[in-house]
Amino acid sequence: MDIRVKSTGRELRRIDNGTALLLMEMFPEALERINSEPATAPVRALSNPLKPLATAHFNVGQHPQSGEFFIRGTDGRSELFFMGEPSQAATFKFALCGGCYAPPEIIEQYNRCKGGQKNPEWLADKALNDRADLEARMKAQARGEKIQ
């Protein structure tokens, strides 16, 4: 705290707050406070915030370990996931592009996946992959390899 002696005009800078308040209490007619508020450093941002990009891209995916379906939204810099009830997917606002919603076709696909109504193309691909995996296991077993 800074104080000034009224009779001489002498300024005393950076005096401990407790000491300055005690002196001002003891000699109110002799001393006055110079700075009424403690000086604070201006708050400055560590970095400039990035402006939202113009477009966002959405897709429906499945977690490889849990098997849970999700909607993924990305704008090229960040990505957000929605893994809730299908009825809430249409009202979930992604904080991408200044706040946007998933397109209706993505929500429809998410509803099908969560409801057990798989896309026929996805089912066909899964069947081919399962068959290829089964054939590879059978060949390995025929060669006497250990199957895990």
Image (tube, rainbow, N blue to C red):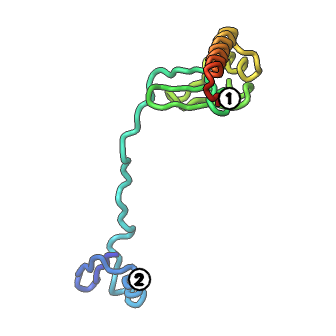
Q: Is residue 46 left or right of residue 72?
A: left
Q: Residues within 10 Å of mark 1 (few under 14, many from 20)?
A: few
Q: Is residue 3 left or right of residue 71?
A: left
Q: CA distance from mark 2 to mark 1?
A: 64 Å
Choose the circle earlier in sequence order: 2 or 1.
Answer: 2
Could you tell me which secondary element the residue under label 2 belongs to?
A: helix
Q: Is residue 58 left or right of residue 66?
A: left
**Image quarter of residue 49:** top left
> Residue at left 67%, top 26%?
69
**According to the image, label 1 marks what residue?**
67
Question: How far from the left and from the top, in percent, is residue 57?
Answer: 52, 20
> Which of the two discs, 2 and 1, sits closer to the camera?
1
**According to the image, label 2 marks what residue?**
18
Where is the C terminus found, in terms of image quarters?
top right
> Residue at left 41%, top 31%?
51
Name the amino acid, label 2.
Gly
**Image quarter of residue 115:** top right
Where is the N terminus found, in terms of image quarters?
bottom left
Question: How far from the left and from the top, in percent, is residue 38?
Answer: 38, 68
